[in-house]
Image: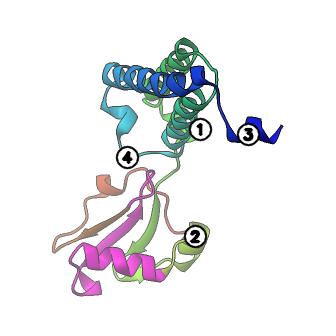
Amino acid sequence: MTSDWLTTSTNELWLVPLSTALVLVAAIAVVRVVGLRSLSKMSSFDFLVTVALGSTVATVAATSTSVINGSLAIASLLGFQSLVALLRRRSGFVKLVDNEPQLLMTGPVMHDATLAKCRITRDDVVAKLREANVTNMDQVLAVVLETTGDISVLHGNGPLQPELLAGVRGPAT
């Protein structure tokens, strides 16, 4: 029984690399058809689809799952992702799939309750401020945790236009 774990058949020696190559070609073809959305900054739903795609490719590469079944699974996952992207345009559906952006900082004031809720530290925010070339806290207009998990720093001279914070949840209380 241990020898089964350590060895493989001659058929599988060529089948594994061939299956891997074929399912990767299929994955690339489907991603090209579906478009760049499948590789964009990820919402939590997009992340789950990406993990499932990787798992599917690995399953086909390392098991006896057929390349056709793996390719169909990849096409189904990306097709479902495209359908969800279309449904996202309806505001009610977006709330089911995407995280809501969170206001982490208004002006020079950090919202500690929101930071705690989002599991983000003050140091994380300060690092993003440095990355955005903020040299003084008074330059900060707002800091937002986006639906993708990125942190956006809005800074500059002028007043902040309200539409830039449309859909952003205010400070947690």
Kind of residue sitting beneath label 1: Leu
Q: Disc 2 or disc 3, which is closer to the eye? A: 3
Spatial CA span between label 2 and label 1: 21 Å
Residue 100: percent from the left, percent from the top? 51, 51
Q: Position of residue 167 (x, y in %)?
A: 43, 50
Q: Is residue 151 left or right of residue 54?
A: left
Mark 3 or mark 4, which is nearer the start of the sequence? 3
Q: Quadrant of residue 4?
A: top right
Question: Residue 27, percent across and down?
Answer: 42, 25
Mark 3 or mark 2, which is nearer the start of the sequence? 3
The stretch of residues the image draws in magenta is 122-150
Residue 77 visible to an observer of this rendering: no
Q: Nearer the viewer, mark 2 or mark 4?
A: 4
The answer for how far apart the CA atoms under marks 4 and 1 are is 18 Å
* Kind of residue sitting beneath label 3: Trp
Q: Secondary structure at mark 2?
A: loop
Looking at the picture, which amino acid does disc 4 mark?
Lys
Q: Return the residue at label 3.
A: 5
Instruction: Say above or below: 159 vs 30.
Output: below
Disc 2 versus disc 1: nearer the observer: 2
Give the residue pinned by disc 1.
96
Residue 41, numbered circle: 4
**What is the three-letter code of the residue carrying label 2?**
Arg
**What residue does disc 2 label?**
119
Q: Is residue 88 left or right of residue 141?
A: right
Colouring style: rainbow
Q: Is residue 53 magenta?
A: no
